[in-house]
Each structure stands twice: as structure tokens, then as C-alpha cells.
């Protein structure tokens, strides 16, 4: 006997042996009928007919289920909405593989209940194989896959499946829920990749979003550990989002030997991670996990705080820069009206919100560094927020991910410091005054690199410092000022320093408030919010602001001739201010003040008008600056009381200094002092050139009363002086510094008098000298705090 021949014959026999019906495949001419199954090679999955509920006649579904657990768990159903009846033993429903490489499910009468619809594949040698992954595959005779059930998923996402979205066609696989526990027909819930942004996954109810993942953050894979139950095994799930040239997909894997584990979209719309315990499925993860996961729970411009732990329930809060649309609703815990943007808030900074699941409806901008991403957003007025991530630093092959938002910020959640969280930078207002030349349109294309991201499972994490302020343009400013180099300083005072730099081909003045400045965040915001709204040729133009840590910066138009006091009280430079210029300055300041008091939509009191706060542009036109002390009133309020008197000695009206009462007439008083200073060239706090009078105001009134008002005029401008104008100014100045606020004219009268002249002005009352007795206590450039009559008095010296 030739043993080699026997071995050869045996091998041949085995190969040629026909496969039985309980094999792992279906071949031509051997239909699958109820009562028989196809079992995968490793016996994990079975394909066959099953019924779900007791009914007569039985509703039969063709499907795939776990073969090795006692509970029937279908992971895929062919005829979901089209059940077969059991038929007869001679004419049962049957699954047949055709000679065109299609699977056809037909019922007893031959009606086609389901088919694979493969076209263009012919050959009688095709087979349908149930793989041990649960994938039913039709193999062409040449070995290629003609069709596979993994590309036509039901409600279950198994390891090895891909939930894809194709960039070009924007379609791909979606899980589709069942209608009910015993009804596999397609329900209204679906799960899949977002065809809009291509960067997140959704659960939808019909076309409405139910829940949204965070945009992929660039994790190649993340492994989650899930405890099946408190005493037994732990499931390790490695999730991945993979991006290729044509598509992006979601996939996951389990280590060998793991308990059966699957993602399933339940008929109630929950995306669950289930793992088989000893006797039942355990839900080891679910999404949405809490109210905050529900899409648009707090839209728009609100965020849902998902970091709170029981018993506190998640609540909606407004993103910084917003306030609730309806306080009443918010206090009742209902948020349907959301948070609108504060219309007035137009400052160039961004507020950084760490630990955020970024809102929906973003646009991906390619190839941006963090600075470029910030500038892109800052420079485009329609951009309301951005988020930046360096995907490479997160261990993937990706590049920079710059997301920008325009319009509403919907579905923002605070998730804390979790794997998928981002820092969201929300614009607190417009940076529109500083625009960069647009050299190219922003391209919105997907990086064609393979990168990955992930998440889905809600993980609770520690919360970061919330609402830490950060201004994006701060880096720009440190760059252009060479980290606030002294050489850029053009002014200095108790408030801090002023730098002159060129920002985007424009000269600007940057006011950097000193860290110990008396101006707190509240006053800073006060200044910013108001100043951004005020537009008048006699008010300094605000460009932007930024806050970073305890740094507070304001960007204004640059005024080449600095502040009025620098010229007016400098013996060698005051000649630059001849009378026509001085008269124009007086009229300009009056118009600027009139605008604040009456012509802007609000009644605004400056509270700190003085020569240092009047800036001069190239042609010496005056612009009022420094709005840190500003107060707004509705028209009905004429006076207000304050316990904190702010301003500068000498310029503070007596009733404000003694009683804390201020009104537009307090500004009129300061204006009067300023007028007397401009005419005389004498500082209000000076004791020189006032011939022994207690102060400038008293000196001016004395000269006026004696009929010698012309002596008040600064001798250095005597030549250019139109005496009638100067005398008119002295008269107006003295009317403005009268003790009784009601006796002082309104700025509208002042402007009218200065521009048209007046034949019949009342004679000024003798002013009180209260303010002047304290003049010299103010030390130039210092903040002085004195306590008088239990009233705190804060004196802020400006530039
Ligand atoms: C395929 O099957 C159809 C009907 O079952 C038959 O008419 C046809 O001849 C078959 N074709 C091949 C190539 O076997
Ligand atoms: C097969 O094609 C028919 C007609 O185009 C369609 O109605 C049916 O839904 C398809 N079946 C499957 C399983 O795709
Ligand atoms: C295998 O067959 C299919 C259809 O019959 C055909 O489209 C495909 O190109 C073939 N592949 C190879 C590698 O021959
Ligand atoms: C899903 O949508 C339907 C129809 O719009 C609605 O009746 C149903 O309440 C929704 N279900 C959930 C859970 O949102
Ligand atoms: C948890 O696991 C233990 C051991 O496998 C098992 O006896 C117990 O029934 C399980 N409990 C649940 C709730 O699944
Ligand atoms: C993005 O950057 C990469 C690498 O620097 C470069 O190859 C690619 O052309 C850039 N894409 C665009 C749209 O600028
Ligand atoms: C500004 O943003 C909007 C919305 O994202 C976009 O349509 C527009 O093209 C952008 N403009 C510029 C100049 O980048
Ligand atoms: C991104 O992160 C990688 C890895 O940490 C680093 O090498 C690279 O410089 C970073 N790129 C930017 C623009 O920050």
C-alpha cells in the first residue's frame, strides 16, 4: 500500500465532501428554511428564522443572533418590516442564493420579502458565508465580497462594523432602531455620522437631532473600561474614528475572549453599550446619559452644566456675554427662550471656556495655528466663537483643528476635563475696527490625512477653573509691544501705562491697566461696553480690548498730540495752542460732553472730565477719553447718590464732593473748570499765577467781578486771542462752576452759547471754594484715598 496515495485520497475526499445545512454557508440550490440554521465557524452567531412574539400564524423574521447565549438576541434582521408566515412544510418561506449572487427571501407563495439587490455579479459558484463576527457575506466566485450585512446594519453596531459617512455623497451606514421590543420594523431613531460637519455623530428622531457627540478631538482610539456588574468582569472597548481620503468611520474592537458586547440603538432612542453577563445583558453605558446630552437643551447661547452630580440636576447657564432671555423662565428651570447675545457688548476679546463640548454647526478651517485660528475669528465679524486643537499633540496624525462658529451657539455643554472636551473661545464683541487685509478666502476643506478621534461615552471628569478670562489678541499685543517694552510707553499714571504701537498698519494706543489699579473688572467692563457704543468725533475711538488673567488692555485710536495737559501746562509747548485752537478745543469738548449727556441714546455722566482726559489728534481736535468712571441713567433719573465719590480734586463739583450727589451738572462743573484752565493756561491745582487767590476759580471770579476778566487770558497767547471769544468762555466757565447745580447751564446751552454767542447771559454767582481747598492733596499720578466723614473718597488721577 502506498501510504502517500491514501493520504492523498483522504484529502481529496474531505475537500469534495458536500457541506451540510448546519454549515457556515449557503450555496446554490440549498435554500435555508425555518428549523435549520447556518452557524458561523466559531459558533458565535447563527442565521435563521425566528419569531419574536406569540402570534398565529407566527411572524417569522430572517436574522442573525448570538448562537451561544440562552437569550435570543437578534443583531440583524433581513425582513424587518415584512415578516413571513410559517407556511407549510412543503412550501415554507426560504432564503435562497441565486445564480446572480443574490440572496432572496421569499414566502410560502413565492412572494419576495427581501433581497440583496446585487447587480452585475454572475456565476453559480457564489456562496453566502456567515462569519464569526456576525457578518453575512456573499462571496463572488473570484473571492471578492459582493454584499455584506455589515454594510446594511439594523439597530446593532458590532465589532468589525463601520458606521461611515462618505465626504462626496454624504451618505453612509446608520443604525435604525426597532419600533418596539417585539417589532423589528424600522423605528424613527437613527444613529450615524453627521453629514453636515463630518466630524461628529448623532442620534436623530426622524430628522430632528436627539443627541450629538463632541466633534472628534483627534484620539486615535480610546479605551473605555466598563464594569459589567459590580462583582464580575470588566469590558474593554477600544473606539476609533478613522478618517480616510473618501470617508470617515466609527469602529470599535474588543480584546479576544471578551464577553459578548454590542452597541445598540434601542427602540426608545437610547444608544447603549450592552455586555452579556452570566444570564442577561447589562447596560454598561448609555447615551444620552443625562438631560445635558439632549440636543439643544439650552439653546441658544446657553450651556448645560453636565458636571454637576446628583442630587443636583443639570441646569442651563448662559455663556459669558449673554444673559437669560427670560429671567422668569430661568428661575423656574425652563429655558426655552435661551440666552440672547447682549446687544451692547462689543469688545474685541474672547472669553475662554475650558472643559466644553463645543456647540454644533461649526465650520472647520484648515491649516491654522492657534494664533491664526484666533485671528480668523477676530477679523470676521460674523464669527462669534472658535475652538482650536492641535491634534498632533493628542497623539494622532492630524494637524491643526480650527473650528469657527457664526450665528447661534447651539447645544453647548460643560463636560469638565474629559477626553473630548475643548476650550471654547467666545467673542465678547467685535474686533471689526482692526481688520487685516484679506489675502485669500478661507478654504473650508477636510484635511486629507488619516486622523482619528473619538468619544461617545460620557465620562465624568474633574472640572477646571471656569470662565477664566483670556483674550486672544493678548499675544498679538505682547508681540507688537515686545512684551511691553518701555520704549513703547507714551503715557503713565495711576491707572497704568499707555503704549503706542502699530497694529495692522494702524497706530493705536494701548492702555494697560496696572494690576493694582483701582479699576476693577467691573469698571473695566463698564468702560468697554459703553465706549464701544459711543461714536462721536469728540470722543476717542475705541478699537478693542482684551483681558488675560489680571491683565486688562484697552486699544484706542492713537492721538499724536497726547493729552491737553501735556501742552497746556508746559511753558515751552503751550504756544502750540494758540487762541483759535483753544477755542476749538473748548467747543469740541462741549460737543463731546453734550453727546454723552443728551445726544447718545442714554444719559451718560463722565464723572472725570479734566485736562488729562482730553486728547488731541493731529490737527489738535479734542477727544474726550477715559470712560472708566462713566455712569448711565435713564432719562427719568436726574440725580443719583453714591457712597463712593470718584473723580479728581479741583474738578469735582461741590455737591458731589460733600454729599455724593451727582448729575449731568457735575460734569458741567468739571467742564467749567477745564474752560478756565484752557483760557488761563493755569492748572486748577496750581498756586502760581493766581495772585494769592485761594485757587483758579476764585481768581477768575475775582477778575470777572472786578471787570478785569481779560487779565485771565494766558499771556502766551495774547497775540492770537479774540478777546470777545475769550471773555465769553470765561463767562461760560464761571456759570458752569457755580455752587448751585441748578444755576449751571446744560451742555446744550453751553454749545449754543459758544457757537452762536449770546447777548444776555446771566451774571455768574460767586463760586464756593470748597474743592480748591483740597486741591493740593492730590498727588499727580497717584491714587489717593482719604476718609472723610465716614465717606470713602477715591480719587483717580489719570494720565
Ligand atoms: C440562473 O437561474 C435562472 C432561473 O433560476 C435560469 O433561468 C438561468 O439559466 C440561470 N443562469 C445560469 C447562468 O445558471
Ligand atoms: C431592492 O431593490 C428594490 C427596488 O429597487 C427595493 O425596493 C428594495 O428595498 C431593495 N432591497 C434591499 C434589501 O435593498
Ligand atoms: C471579481 O468578480 C467581480 C464580479 O464578478 C468583479 O467585479 C471583480 O472585478 C472581480 N475581481 C477580481 C479580482 O477578479
Ligand atoms: C420622536 O419624534 C416623534 C415625531 O416627531 C415624536 O412624536 C416623539 O415624541 C419623538 N420622540 C422622542 C423621544 O423625542
Ligand atoms: C454579576 O456577576 C456575578 C458573577 O458572574 C453573577 O453571579 C451575578 O448574577 C451578576 N449580577 C448581575 C446583576 O448581572
Ligand atoms: C496644509 O498644510 C500642509 C502641510 O503644511 C500642506 O501640505 C497643505 O497644502 C496645506 N493645505 C492648505 C489648504 O493650505
Ligand atoms: C466670515 O465668516 C462667514 C461665516 O462663517 C463666512 O461665510 C465668510 O466667508 C467669512 N468671511 C471672511 C472674509 O472670511
Ligand atoms: C502640535 O503638537 C505637536 C506634538 O506635541 C508639536 O510638535 C507641534 O509643534 C504642535 N504644533 C503647534 C502648531 O502647536
Image (cartoon, rainbow, N blue to C red):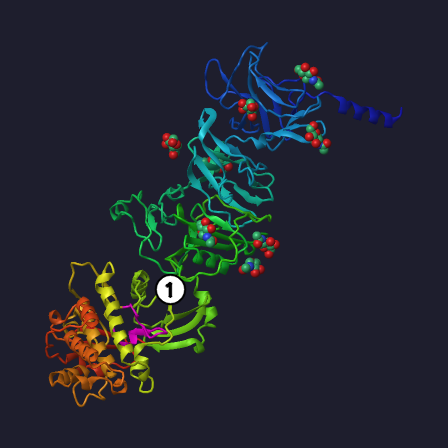
Q: Is residue 123 visible?
A: yes
Q: Position of residue 48 (x, y in %)?
A: 57, 22
Magenta-highlighted residues: 609-628
Nearest the camera: 290 or 766?
A: 766
Ligand 4 position by quadrant: top left
Nearest the camera: 301 or 617?
A: 617
At x 66%, y 31%, the residue is 145
Q: Position of residue 607 (x, y in %)?
A: 23, 70
Please say if 496 is above or below 1.
Answer: below
The picture quadrant where one finds residue 785 is bottom left
Please say if 421 is above or below 586.
Answer: above
The picture quadrant where one finds residue 757 is bottom left
Nearest the camera: 583 or 33?
A: 583
Nearest the camera: 562 or 522?
A: 562
Residue located beneath label 1 in the image: 543
Q: Is residue 354 left or right of residue 61?
A: left
Amino acid at each position: 500500500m502506498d501510504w502517500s496515495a491514501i493520504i492523498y485520497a483522504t484529502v481529496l475526499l474531505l475537500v469534495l465532501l458536500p457541506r451540510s445545512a448546519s454549515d457556515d454557508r449557503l450555496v446554490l440550490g440549498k435554500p435555508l428554511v425555518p428549523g435549520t440554521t447556518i452557524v458561523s465557524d466559531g459558533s458565535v452567531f447563527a442565521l435563521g428564522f425566528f419569531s419574536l412574539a406569540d402570534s398565529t400564524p407566527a411572524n417569522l423574521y430572517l436574522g442573525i443572533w448570538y448562537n451561544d447565549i440562552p437569550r435570543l438576541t437578534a443583531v440583524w434582521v433581513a425582513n424587518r418590516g415584512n415578516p413571513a408566515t410559517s407556511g407549510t412544510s412543503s412550501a415554507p418561506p426560504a432564503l435562497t442564493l441565486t445564480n446572480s449572487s443574490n440572496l432572496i427571501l421569499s414566502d410560502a407563495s413565492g412572494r419576495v420579502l427581501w433581497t440583496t439587490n446585487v447587480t452585475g455579479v454572475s456565476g453559480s459558484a457564489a456562496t453566502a458565508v456567515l462569519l464569526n463576527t456576525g457578518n453575512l457575506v456573499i462571496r463572488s466566485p473570484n473571492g471578492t465580497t459582493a454584499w455584506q450585512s455589515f454594510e446594511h446594519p439594523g439597530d446593532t453596531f458590532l465589532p468589525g462594523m463601520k458606521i461611515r459617512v462618505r465626504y462626496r455623497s454624504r451618505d453612509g451606514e446608520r443604525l435604525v432602531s426597532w419600533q418596539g421590543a417585539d417589532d423589528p420594523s424600522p423605528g424613527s431613531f437613527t444613529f450615524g455620522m453627521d453629514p453636515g460637519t463630518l466630524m461628529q455623530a448623532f442620534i436623530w428622531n426622524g430628522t430632528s437631532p436627539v443627541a450629538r457627540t463632541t466633534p472628534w478631538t483627534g484620539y486615535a482610539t480610546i479605551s473605555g473600561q466598563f464594569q459589567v456588574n459590580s462583582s464580575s468582569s470588566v469590558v474593554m472597548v477600544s473606539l476609533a474614528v478613522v478618517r480616510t481620503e473618501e470617508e470617515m468611520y466609527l469602529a470599535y474592537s474588543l480584546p479576544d475572549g471578551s464577553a459578548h458586547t454590542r452597541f445598540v440603538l434601542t427602540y426608545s432612542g437610547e444608544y447603549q453599550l450592552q455586555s452579556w453577563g452570566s444570564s442577561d445583558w447589562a447596560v454598561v453605558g448609555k447615551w444620552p446619559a443625562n438631560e445635558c446630552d439632549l440636543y439643544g437643551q439650552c439653546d441658544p447661547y446657553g450651556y448645560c452644566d453636565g458636571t454637576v452630580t446628583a442630587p443636583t440636576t443639570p441646569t442651563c447657564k448662559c455663556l459669558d456675554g449673554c444673559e437669560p432671555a427670560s429671567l422668569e423662565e430661568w428661575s423656574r428651570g425652563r429655558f426655552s427662550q435661551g440666552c440672547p447675545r447682549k446687544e451692547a457688548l462689543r469688545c474685541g476679546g474672547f472669553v475662554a471656556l475650558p472643559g466644553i463640548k463645543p456647540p454644533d454647526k461649526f465650520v472647520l478651517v484648515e491649516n491654522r495655528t492657534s494664533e491664526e485660528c484666533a485671528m480668523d475669528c477676530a477679523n470676521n465679524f460674523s464669527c462669534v466663537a472658535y475652538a482650536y486643537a492641535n491634534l498632533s499633540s493628542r497623539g494622532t496624525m492630524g494637524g491643526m483643528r480650527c473650528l469657527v462658529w457664526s450665528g447661534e451657539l447651539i447645544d453647548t455643554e460643560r463636560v469638565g476635563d474629559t477626553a473630548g472636551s475643548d476650550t471654547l473661545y467666545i467673542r465678547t464683541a467685535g474686533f471689526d475696527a482692526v481688520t487685516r487685509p484679506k489675502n485669500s478666502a478661507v478654504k473650508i476643506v477636510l484635511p486629507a490625512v488619516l486622523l482619528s478621534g473619538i468619544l461617545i461615552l460620557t465620562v465624568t471628569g474633574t472640572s477646571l477653573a471656569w470662565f477664566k478670562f483670556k483674550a486672544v489678541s493678548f499675544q498679538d499685543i505682547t508681540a507688537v509691544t515686545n512684551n511691553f517694552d518701555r520704549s513703547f510707553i507714551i503715557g503713565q499714571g495711576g491707572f497704568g501705562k499707555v503704549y503706542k504701537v502699530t497694529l495692522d498698519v494702524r497706530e493705536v494706543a494701548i492702555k494697560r491697566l496696572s494690576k493694582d489699579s483701582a479699576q476693577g473688572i467691573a469698571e473695566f467692563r463698564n468702560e468697554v461696553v459703553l465706549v464701544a457704543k459711543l461714536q462721536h468725533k469728540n470722543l476717542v475711538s475705541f478699537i478693542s480690548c482684551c483681558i488675560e488673567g489680571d491683565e486688562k488692555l484697552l486699544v484706542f485710536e492713537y492721538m499724536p498730540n497726547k493729552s491737553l495737559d501735556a501742552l497746556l501746562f508746559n511753558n515751552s509747548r503751550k504756544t502750540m495752542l494758540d487762541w483759535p485752537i483753544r477755542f476749538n478745543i473748548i467747543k469740541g469738548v462741549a460737543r463731546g460732553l453734550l453727546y454723552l449727556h443728551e445726544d447718545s441714546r442714554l444719559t451718560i455722566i463722565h464723572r472725570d472730565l479734566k485736562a488729562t482726559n482730553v486728547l488731541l489728534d493731529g490737527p489738535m481736535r479734542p477727544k474726550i477719553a477715559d470712560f472708566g468712571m462713566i455712569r448711565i441713567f435713564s432719562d427719568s433719573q436726574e440725580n443719583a447718590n453714591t457712597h463712593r465719590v470718584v473723580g479728581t480734586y479741583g474738578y469735582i463739583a461741590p455737591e458731589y464732593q460733600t454729599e455724593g450727589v451727582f448729575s449731568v451738572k457735575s460734569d458741567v462743573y468739571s467742564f467749567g473748570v477745564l474752560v478756565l484752565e484752557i483760557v488761563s493756561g493755569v492748572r486748577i491745582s496750581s498756586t502760581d499765577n493766581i495772585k494769592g487767590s485761594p485757587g483758579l476759580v476764585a481768581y477768575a471770579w475775582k477778575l470777572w467781578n472786578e471787570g478785569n476778566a481779560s487779565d485771565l487770558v494766558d499771556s502766551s497767547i495774547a497775540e492770537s486771542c479774540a478777546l470777545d471769544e475769550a471773555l465769553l468762555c470765561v463767562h461760560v466757565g464761571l456759570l458752569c462752576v457755580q455752587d448751585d447745580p441748578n444755576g449751571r447751564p446744560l451742555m446744550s446751552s453751553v454749545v449754543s452759547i459758544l457757537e452762536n454767542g449770546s447777548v444776555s447771559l446771566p451774571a455768574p454767582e460767586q463760586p464756593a471754594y470748597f474743592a480748591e481747598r483740597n486741591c493740593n492733596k492730590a498727588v499727580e499720578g497717584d491714587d489717593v484715598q482719604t476718609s472723610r466723614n465716614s465717606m470713602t473718597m477715591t480719587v483717580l488721577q489719570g494720565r
